[in-house]
Image: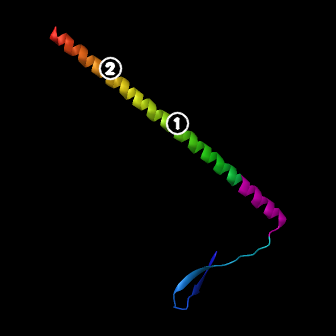
Amino acid sequence: MYAVCVSDAGRLEKTPTIVVTKFDPKIGIHIAKALQLQRDVQRRMHEQMEIQRNLQSQIEEQGRQLKQMLDHQLKTRNINLASIRNN
């Protein structure tokens, strides 16, 4: 949290403030559980992002391979057509 105060030069400045509150132990337990749940969700999201990156790389590689195959087929087809025309 920040408190807004006026500096010696007359400007408004934000200064950090210390907030001290007392929690009911039950609330503290709920907060700890919520934080643990949040960490678990973030970890799972990170794992899913890694899986998505790997899948995207595989898709891109398959696309490159498919393009090479199609280019090769077109080249072979053009060579075959040219040889038929020459005969």
Residue 5 coordinates in the image, percent (x, y): 59, 86
Residue type highlighted by circle 1: Leu
Report the span colored magenta: 23-36
User: Left or right: 6 with respect to 23?
Assistant: left
Mark toward the start of the polypeptide (1 vs 2):
1
Image-quadrant location for residue 51: top right
Q: Which residue is mark 1?
A: 55
Kindly check if marks 1 and 2 are in contact, taking CB atoms under 8 A apart as contact. Answer: no
Image-quadrant location for residue 49: top right
Considering the whole magenta stretch, tell me its main secondary structure.
Answer: helix
**Residue at image x 52%, y 91%?**
10
The image's mark for residue 73 is: 2
Q: Residues within 10 Å of mark 2 (few under 14, many from 20)?
A: few
Residue type highlighted by circle 2: Gln
Closer to us: 29 or 61: 61
Residue 4 coordinates in the image, percent (x, y): 59, 82
Q: Is residue 64 above or below residue 45?
A: above
Residue 38 coordinates in the image, percent (x, y): 68, 54
User: Left or right: 27 with respect to 8?
Assistant: right
